[in-house]
Amino acid sequence: MFDTYAEIFAKRAADYHHAMRQSPRARDAEFNAVLEPLRERPLGLICDMPSGGGYLADYLWPGMDYLAVDPATDFFVEWPRPLQRLLAEITKVPLADRSVDYVVSLAGLHHEPSLPDVFREMRRLLRPGGRVVLADVAADTAPARFLNGFVAENCPLGHEGRFLDERTAPALAASGFSVTDDRVIAVPWRFASFDEAGEFCRHLFGMPALGIPETAAAMEREIGFDVDQDGPRLRWILRQIVADVV
Ligand SMILES: C[S@@+](CC[C@H](N)C(=O)[O-])C[C@H]1O[C@@H](n2cnc3c(N)ncnc32)[C@H](O)[C@@H]1O
């Protein structure tokens, strides 16, 4: 019997969360990168949307408050810390206008059918002086080809990402933001071994039926690793855009 979409997606969220718990430091570079543009800013409330399991919270500094927003219930099953969280679409967040200081959106916009709707919602939520930091896979890069190719073929849910490109920053500007930075950044995923890399990736991208060596080999072939004394680092890159409330 076929799983319903909800059942498949519930499993997908559980797999993703499993990968993040098994290798909690693998994506340090990504989480640190999206917070970098906020380091010198006044303390306030960061809204993370979509948050997945709220992983960004582990990287905050004292005094920065955190709110997780995600539409998938399964990410909110296990929640080890007393964090604020909202189960909501990122186009319709049940919060008042001008109620947050910063918005961070990491690796979630490529699933979103209407970016202008998301940007309008971010603009509505932000207070004067607010800043948004977006980071996601960039169109026409190795990670984009890997996700819409290898992952699409091997994940039961498929993968049809619409990735960030040169139209993203103008769309943000049209929603009432002033774009201050837009570039592709290196955010390597680090592992102790190739086996850990394969195990992480097959769960993160919902391909649990694939073998570990097979998955690691595809990562090597399609994206590539650098290896140093600490282990392999996957050459993951993202497009990061920073914009301020006009
Ligand atoms: C790759 S995860 C990123 C989560 C987290 N920011 C991270 O970096 O680990 C993608 C997230 O997008 C959410 N999502 C799925 N479909 C979505 C949609 N149409 N709009 C917004 N978020 C969506 C999922 O629930 C999931 O949490």
Image: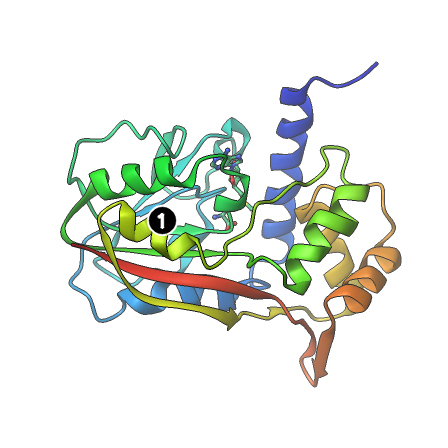
Q: Residues within 10 Å of mark 1 (few under 14, many from 20)?
A: some
Nearer the observer, 164 or 156? 164
- State left or right for residue 86 relative to residue 97: right
Relative height, residue 23 to residue 85 (above, below): below
For residue 195, what is the image quadrant? bottom right
For residue 161, what is the image quadrant? top right
Nearer the observer, 66 or 113? 113
- State left or right for residue 133 relative to residue 29: left
At 69% from the left edge and 84% from the top edge, which residue is drawn?
A: 228
The answer to whether residue 99 is seen in the rendering is yes
Relative height, residue 146 to residue 194 (above, below): above
Q: In the rendered image, which residue does mark 1 sit on?
A: 171
At 37% from the left edge and 39% from the top edge, which residue is drawn?
A: 116
For residue 8, what is the image quadrant? top right
Some atom of ligand 1 lies within 8 Å of the CB belonging to the residue at label 1: no
Report the residue that reaches farthest toward the bottom. 229
Residue 147 x %, y %:
69, 51
At 70% from the left edge and 56% from the top edge, which residue is drawn?
A: 145
Under tag 1, what secondary structure? helix
Nearer the observer, 166 or 19? 166
Report the residue that reaches farthest toward the left. 128
User: How is the structure coloured here?
Assistant: rainbow
The answer to whether residue 68 is seen in the rendering is no
Residue 9 x %, y %:
64, 29
Task: Please state, as top left, top right, bottom left or bottom right, where the N terminus lies in the image.
Answer: top right
Task: Please state, as top left, top right, bottom left or bottom right, where the C terminus lies in the image.
Answer: bottom left
In this rendering, the count of numbered labels is: 1
Report the residue that reaches farthest toward the top. 1
For the residue marked with disc 1, what is the amino acid? Ala
Residue 185 x %, y %:
50, 71
Residue 213 x %, y %:
87, 60
